[in-house]
Structures are given as C-alpha cells and as structure tokens.
Amino acid sequence: MVMRYIEPHAHMVSRTTDDYTAMATAGCEIVCEPAFWAGFDRHSADGFFDYFRQLTEHEPKRAGKFGLKHYCWLCINPKESEDLTLAREVMGLIPKFLAASNVLGIGEIGLNKNTRNELKALEEQIDLAARHNQLILVHTPHLEDKLKGTKLIVDALRNEARLRPERVIIDHVEEHTIELALNAGFWAGMTLYPESKCTAARAADMIELYGHERLWMNSACDWGVSVPLAVPRAALEMRQRGHSEALIQKVVYENPRAFLSQSPHFAL
Amino acid sequence: MELYFLEARAKVIDVAAFLDRAERAQGQDDFRLAALRQALRELASAGADRAKRVLLALSDPSAEPLPTASGKGACGAWPGTKP
C-alpha cells in the first residue's frame, strides 16, 4: 500500500521535475509553497509581483503535470523585511493575489535576526491577515536566534485580538520552542533538515513527548541543503519505532488536511 | 538501542574529534567553542530533556529586538556566551 501524505511546506520553484516525480511516487498528493527568500535580495516590488504570479499561475500547472495539487502562501519574507519601504510596497501587492484559487493565506512571515524592522513588518502582515481573514504560516529564526524570535512572534500574534490561534501555524519548531507554540493554542510544524532544524528521529521524539494534535512535519525543501522526501522518510522512522499506520497517517495527512481545510480555497 | 546506538556513538566520536582538532589549532577560543562546551555539560547531566537544554545553551537569551541586522545568517551560538 502506498502511503498518502501532504507536503505542507516546500519551495518547489527551487526544485526540479525529478523531485515532483519522486514526491508523487512516494505518495504525495498535495504540495504547499510559502513565499520565501530566493537566496538573494530582490531589488524592487516588481520582482515579488513576478514571484507571486509564478506561485499562483505557473507552479500549479507544473505540479499538475505530475498529478500533484499545488497551493501557496504569500508575503514578504523576514529576510527581506529589514527594508520597510520595500516590505510595505510588497505588502501592497498581496491583496489582489488573495483571490487566486490556490492561495491559502499569509506566509511564511516571521523573524530572521529579530530586529525592530522585521518585527514591524511581521506586525503589519499579521494585521493584513486579520483584515482579510487569512490563515497564517510563521517562519521562526535559525539556530541561536530561534528561541528569542519565537517568543517575540508568539507575543506579536497574541497581541492581535482578531486572530484565532488555531488558524496560525508556527513552523520550524524544535525541542526548546515547541511548547511555546502549542501551549499558546497555535499549530506547530517540524521541519526535517539534514543539518539544522530537526531530524526525523527528533520529530518522532517530539510526537511521543507532546502528542500528535496540532502538529505536522514538512521538508521545507528549497535551493539549500534539504530533502524533498523528508516527510515519507520520517514516516519510515516512525514505522521502524513501531508506531501505528493510523498515527503516521494522522501526522502526515490528516493533520495538515485539518489545518489547511480552514482555508476556503483548500480542497482534496 | 538497536535503532540508534551506533549512530549516536559515531556522532559522539565526531564531536570528540572536532574538539581535538580545535585543541591542536592555533588561535584563541571563541564564543562558539564556549557555547559548545556549555552544551556538552548539559549532555553529560541527568534528566530526560537534554536536547532542549543543549538548544537553550546555544540560544540567544536576550529579549529585546535588535536595532538593525548585521547580516542575514546565524552561526549556531550566541556571541555573548562567556567561557
């Protein structure tokens, strides 16, 4: 029996068609792509306009050739938010794209180096999401910056009274941040990377320690060191530990479906 | 044990070899090595939350947002870590 799974966080514009083939072969049915940093800074809002068209028009067709449904999230990512003038120009582009049939919400917003400008851009995008009743997907910072950034992000989200925590997922959690997200009522995402963030074994540990509610796993595969098949490999890790197929299906399929179904655009 | 012991053994030896390499190298200690040594103390301590405590030892403990970003990357340890 082929396992079914949803890849809730993958940057497919950076990946090859071979990756789409491998993911579809492994049982992936749906791939969701947050807007992110391309590895270099874009000089103008026009670059983001083209990127948002790529996410809403081109990439769904490319994924469709391999039998995969493609959804996306839109935002100015935290790594390019330090320039608030540019960030606000990009935010101004987003509302016209929200009606596109594959847009799930605002993301991945968050912090990178935990600066005042990044935080301001985050707060303005939280407001944007609240005004347009959009789901939110949050990027938490890397390595030594993750703990502080996650605390600042949770505070910013809790300060917005229009938000319901069950409509927000805080991604890239690790052992020192997962409780900050879950205890505040948010969803939490575990990103499976070979060198940073979280391994499959640690993700399985966290499922055992913190339960399987409001939790998903993703590959966040992009242009850097990352593995498009990280989610099915984590499922294998769980299987090797003796976890039931029902639990594995819940984490890799039912949970992302439950969260994403809160968007009227999401359909299986 | 069957699933993870050999992998953990290999990783511990890699860390030991890295520390030996750092010991042989010229130059001063820096905050990353100090943070790693703190993390290793957590590793050797008792309790079932070592992964969390190691991550905390390698984290920025401050609370206020920075005035500006000096770059985009992270280095894996907080520059304020004391030896």
Image (cartoon, coloured by chain):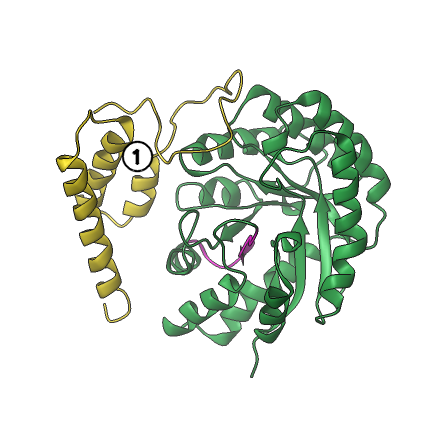
Chain colours: A green, B yellow
Q: Is residue A52 visible?
A: yes
Q: Is residue A264 magenta?
A: no
Residue B77 in percent (x, y) is at: 34, 32
Q: Give residue A66's quadrant in the image.
A: bottom right
Q: Is residue B68 left or right of residue B76?
A: right
Please rate how many residues cluster around mark 1, counting C-alpha atoms within 10 Å: few if below 14, some from 14 to 19, many from 20: many
Q: Is residue A141 above or below residue A13?
A: above
Q: Nearer the viewer, residue A123 or B71?
A: B71
Furthest residue in direction bottom, as rendered: A1
Q: Is residue A201 above or below residue A132?
A: below
Magenta span of residues: A210-222
Furthest residue in direction top, as rendered: B67
Residue drawn at the location 70% of the way across and 67% of the way down: A68
Residue drawn at the location 67% of the way across and 30% of the way down: A160
Q: Nearer the viewer, residue A160 or A4?
A: A4
| Secondary structure mostly seen in the magenta stretch | loop
Residue A189 in percent (x, y) is at: 54, 51
Q: Is residue A251 above or below residue A111?
A: below
The residue to which callout 1 is attached is B57
Furthest residue in direction front, as rendered: B26
Residue A134 in percent (x, y) is at: 75, 43
Quadrant into which the C terminus of chain A falls? bottom right
Residue drawn at the location 62% of the way across and 52% of the way down: A14
